Amino acid sequence: MIVRTRTACPPGVHQISLPTPYPVGRSNAFLIQGDPPVLVDCGVKSTRATAELEAGLGEHGVRLEDLGAILLSHPHFDHSGAAAAIARRTGVKVVGHRFGLEYEFRGRDAFYRVLAQYGAPPSLIDTLVAMNDYGDRFGEQLTALAKLELLDQGDRFVMGGAELDVLYTPGHNAAHLCFHDRGRGALYCGDLLLAGITPNPLPHFDLEADRGRLLSLNLYLDSLDRVEALGPVIGLTGHGRPLADTAAAARKARRQIHQRAEIVLELCYEHLGQTLFALAGRLFGEENPLGEALAFSELLAHADRLEANGRIKVDHERGTVVWAQEPIAEETE
Ligand SMILES: [Zn+2]
């Protein structure tokens, strides 16, 4: 095995890698030492993951019962699944964005509806329902918890050794927060930025005004702007190793989004009349149900943005692209 130089956690912060049952693999929790200690994310609800979490905390002399708060980057079970069970056991306060803590998770049914609307076969949706039912065993809704603290853009969270500025960073999930530790030059960035993976711009549905689907890629780009404005700091990510420079990672993610947009435009132009689901299959060629769904999700996010920018026209009844602007030719060969 080759050991490369890796960006490490700043002093007083420890990364605890936890197993998940999902294809993404392990997820990260972070212990911020202090009195009391604070945890950022907590992994799935499973005997094995919680045992590894307790062992990881124990290496630094911390028990679950000692925690003053669990901060959540976002309410996906690979990051938040264990929060309700830990809170019931220890009375710890759970902290996150209100969309994750006050609202039942309703995005999934809406996602099935858009899959059907834009051409996915019913058999795929049935498979996803079964997969998600399985995945649901690894977490709980947080809405029923007594001790919640809701945070939003511009808030500050101070406890023990944690002094964090809160950034609201939707784009992967509508309840996504990043936490900026100015003193340590670090950003807990959840799934907004990851080393070697482009996070999926999952459909965002308006939970309050019922205005339907939001432009998740525009939200994503705004979130990247917010992160880049912090300058170069260490990124403590929800999966994998820390990032050396979140501003550079944000710039790279933005470039990838703009490049992918041109590829999607070209695809729409060349295959007018096809459904968005069929176009996603052409672009990504995924052959497993989750891969197909995530490919569709990314294509839908681009199609929504291209349409909002007047570059394509979608027949939302039929789920097909009916017009696309002629792609701009590459300047260089
Ligand atoms: Zn994740």
Image: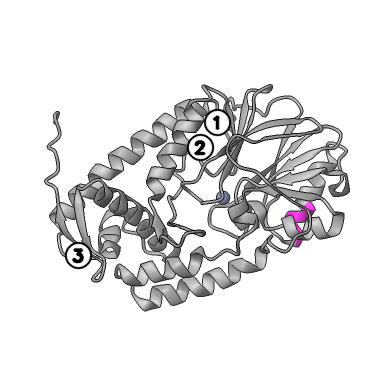
- Residue span colored magenta: 47-51
Q: Which residue is mark 3?
A: 274
Q: Mark 2: which amino acid?
A: Ala
Of circles 1 and 3, the one toward us is 3
Q: Looking at the image, tell me whether mark 1 or mark 2 is earlier in sequence order.
A: 2
- Give the quadrant of residue 180: top right
Residue 48 in magenta?
A: yes
- Where does the image place residue 29, in percent across and percent down from the top left? 69, 44
Q: Secondary structure at mark 3?
A: loop
Q: Closer to the N terminus: mark 1 or mark 3?
A: 1
Query: Crowding at label 2, few (<14), some or many (≥20) Cα neighbours within 10 Å?
Result: some
The vertical placement of 138 against 24, above or below, is below
Q: Residues within 10 Å of mark 3 (few under 14, many from 20)?
A: some
Label 3 and label 2: CA atoms lie apart by 34 Å
- The residue labelled by disc 1 is 243
Tell me the residue at 46%/43% (across/down). 197
- Seen from the viewer's position, the closer of residues 271 and 68 is 68
